[in-house]
């Protein structure tokens, strides 16, 4: 309790200074370390203070630099509320809406804000092409044969090496490759879920996960989720007896972009392990942090092998290569069996190419550029939204990832906005896609993976203009 | 009835002439057309006569040439019996055996008769490598982006064009691509099967199918299966009220190598449609016919959209590319949804490469050579078995595909033979792997996809020698 008190005390104190204009827009704040010393608090508490201030849109973090007081325009654009889904498992899948959004994506000349992947221009296409060619040369039998079941050993080694940087600490033998991230999640859900079991997830949640769980006959329990810090752990505790599996995107979740603080990750991992509930962790956005450091994952705090860590290169390198992986902990045998049954082998050529690309720091260099581009995009999007969207609009301020979550005034239904926008050759993702309940009708997700340009700015403004007509 | 009578009458007449030495080893038999004229029978009946004689090991078909009386050595090697599985759905999965066989495959220097794919030497590796490189050049964004959900349009068109040759008559729009053939089957089973449903299959059956069905909670009903003509339709009729799905490999099934005659295919399709039972047809071996013509598939006789036709290039071109497809008939929407949920997109590069390879007759040329190699292998294997396996050994005489099914005397358990063989660096697939019941303990499958050589001959002989020690 004392710790909680100190934390809000300091947060409010700084917030007050900003609102009263004592700290001005653009002012640099003390470093986290300095804050610790000044207030005699722990690093974790200091980080939480800044995270909370960020979540209130009062301060900004700039990579390699530190924290700054936000410009007033951002201060006027508040965060969406913590979601309040019903805690009764629901399965009201918005099938027609999803089909409509999906089918329309084939339209020519469409500006697609509705799909959560980086645009091709942001990817190292030429270098990957070379690696594909190298792969056909280096692989035994030109890659025409099956791989070993667990997956390309070079790729698994490279993933293991990278994981040391952020506390994953995998060995190559801990990992099983899959055909992309969704295939990783699908294997985990098939391995763990029995028909009728209940799975707890974030709300709003990536539609692929909702549909996958629903399609496998699992009941879906949506948890209240904070736009900055992720699921509300107190609620998870309350419903813990009702659930069999938990699936989270702890780092820069889609669509909210929330990132669970380390202590929350630790607490959730402990809570679930104590209750014998496996945690599926989807970390596909983990490398897309805007801050100075890559966030840890829940798996870092897992001592029981109870976390099934899933990731891929679909959000960072080449969605079309379908290269993903699982560190399944104690469920490895189950996952291997499912892989054998449902896909036999990953596709050698793309896996070998990615393994080679990951060598020699090429991936780090690319990620550095991609993160920079996404962060710039994010700021430009938010600025444009603040300037041209209807009054009362709220938006997330993600510290990484590929999505912005926008909440309009209650009287603006985004399904209606979708229909107006598609006529102008713009595709958005209405909030209703991200839940199996009747909520988020006035919300939408915007992908920030499109390179910034006058045209994108114009299209964004157009969404705002259309929203004002409703 | 009259037709049945004529058919056995003529068959027995010719068999009699062979056994009495009136027709001698190597003698050419009249063409099918000539047989029609001579006996005033239909083409179908004439074909069945020769098929039956072949199944009795009395005659051989030679591609582009016709039918010949077999050499005595083959006449002394009878066919295995029609299988007699229990008709009670069973799920006694031989897990440990499968794991053991699978894990041992990693052993260095092993001669692997236990996996059903063609060896790399029989595949057009260099040409495929070129097509991979072309694919990275031709594809939008170098293939780093997602494909359209239904799959690469060029590939679907090429498959559709090829299907015209053998009565498949698909259009590109009828097809959905998948990550290999097993992924096609997995989507079909997930689309159609509810937990607790019963699926009817051939017995013995490819272990991947048994495990997949079992893994999805389906009850497996194994049907008595003839080594030449496939499942016994009379039994299917008897159990039709008990089953919800039927899955067959009508052309050169693994492991039996049986090929259902056209009239059987037609009858099964009709029977299942009348009873509203979907048929999943696995046709991965269909292009590997040794006779003059590619056999039709069940889908050719499907007027209701009730057959889900699955195939791939894994048995003919590049197992490691994982390129497969489904023509799902009226279940297309369900399959598309599953593909979206479980894999989002196929992998553009390998699909584009295969599409390009299929153009300009390159595939036909390759298939011609591959079929020739496999048929030669098959004859060499059978000859070696006849010469060096214990007395009382029976073996199939497949007219296509990649497998031989060998039945030893009852006192030779192949699980024991497996252990002896693996010590000599030889891997076989014991019969128990191909059923969920206690049967086929004295059987094994041998893959004929290894290029013939003195070494392979030596290894085969060694299996025979080991079997004699039991």
Image (spheres, coloured by chain):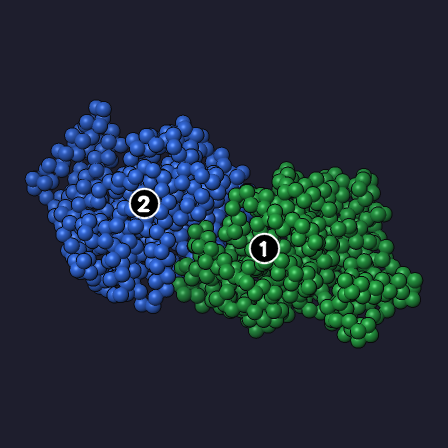
Chain colours: A green, B blue
Viewer-proximal residue among B94 and B81: B94
Q: For marks 1 and 2, give the one nearer the viewer.
A: 1
Query: Can you identify the residue that label 2 sits on?
Result: B437
Is residue A62 in view?
Answer: no
Q: From this viewpoint, which residue is outermost toward the front?
A: A1
Left or right, A174 with reference to B281: right
Chain identifier of the residue bearing label 1 in the image? A
Q: Position of residue A463 (x, y in %)?
A: 77, 46
Question: Residue B314's spot in the image, x, y percent?
Answer: 40, 52
Give the percent coordinates (x, y) of residue A386: 83, 53
**Is label 1 in contact with label 2 (beta carbons under 8 Å)?**
no
Residue B321 percent coordinates (x, y)? 45, 56
Secondary structure under tag 1 reads loop
Residue A392, visible in the rendered structure? yes
Residue located at (38% from left, 30% from top): B241
What secondary structure is found at the residue carrying circle 2?
A: loop
Residue B48: quarter of image: top left
- Say which of B312 and B463 sits in front: B463
Name the subunit of mark 2: B
Q: Name the one closer to the observer, A461 or B124.
A: A461
Image position of A176 (left or right of A266) = left
Marks counted in the figure total 2
- Given residues A442 and B283, the one toward you in this image is A442
Describe residue B329's horizontal placement relative to residue B235 as left or right.
right
The residue where tag 1 is placed is: A275
Assign the C terminus of chain B to one quadrant of the image.
bottom left
Identified at 22% across, 42% down, the residue is B81
Residue drawn at x 19%, y 51% is B411
């Amino acid at each position: 309790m004392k710790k909680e008190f100190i934390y809000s005390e300091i947060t409010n104190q700084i917030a007050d200074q900003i609102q009263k204009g004592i700290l001005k827009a653009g002012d640099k704040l003390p470093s986290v370390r300095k804050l610790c010393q000044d207030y005699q608090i722990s690093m974790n508490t200091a980080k939480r203070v800044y995270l909370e201030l960020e979540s209130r849109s009062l301060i900004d973090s700039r990579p390699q630099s530190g924290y700054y007081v936000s410009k007033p325009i951002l201060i006027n654009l508040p965060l969406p509320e913590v979601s309040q889904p019903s805690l009764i498992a629901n399965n009201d899948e918005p099938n027609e809406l999803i089909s409509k959004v999906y089918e329309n994506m084939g339209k020519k000349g469409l500006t697609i804000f509705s799909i959560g992947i980086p645009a091709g221009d942001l990817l190292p296409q030429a270098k990957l092409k070379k690696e594909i060619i190298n792969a056909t040369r280096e692989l035994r039998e030109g890659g025409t044969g099956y791989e070993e079941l667990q997956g390309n050993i070079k790729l698994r080694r490279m993933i293991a090496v990278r994981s040391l940087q952020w506390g994953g600490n995998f060995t190559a033998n801990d990992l099983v490759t899959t055909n992309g991230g969704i295939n990783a999640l699908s294997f985990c859900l098939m391995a763990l879920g029995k028909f009728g079991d209940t799975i707890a997830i974030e709300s709003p949640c990536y539609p692929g996960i909702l549909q996958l769980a629903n399609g496998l006959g699992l009941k879906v329990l949506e948890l209240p989720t904070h736009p900055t810090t992720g699921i509300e752990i107190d609620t998870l505790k309350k419903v813990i007896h009702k659930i069999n599996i938990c699936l989270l995107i702890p780092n820069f979740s889609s669509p909210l972009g929330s990132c669970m603080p380390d202590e929350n990750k630790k607490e959730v991992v402990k809570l679930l392990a104590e209750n014998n509930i496996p945690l599926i962790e989807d970390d596909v956005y983990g490398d897309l942090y805007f801050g100075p450091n890559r966030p840890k994952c829940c798996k870092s705090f897992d001592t029981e092998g109870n976390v099934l860590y899933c990731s891929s290169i679909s959000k960072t390198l080449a969605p079309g290569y379908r290269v993903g992986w699982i560190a399944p902990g104690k469920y490895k045998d189950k996952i291997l069996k499912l892989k054998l049954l449902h896909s036999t082998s990953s596709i050698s050529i793309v896996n070998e190419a990615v393994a080679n690309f990951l060598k020699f720091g090429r991936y780090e260099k690319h990620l550095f550029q991609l993160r920079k581009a996404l962060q710039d995009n994010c700021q430009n999007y938010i600025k444009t939204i603040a300037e041209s969207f209807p009054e009362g609009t709220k938006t997330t301020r993600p510290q990484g990832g590929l999505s912005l979550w926008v909440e309009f005034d209650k009287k603006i239904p985004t399904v209606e906005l979708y229909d107006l926008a598609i006529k102008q050759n713009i595709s958005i993702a209405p909030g209703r896609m991200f839940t199996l309940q009747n909520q988020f009708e006035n919300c939408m997700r915007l992908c920030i993976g499109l390179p910034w340009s006058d045209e994108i700015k114009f299209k964004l403004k157009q969404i705002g203009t259309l929203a004002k007509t409703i």
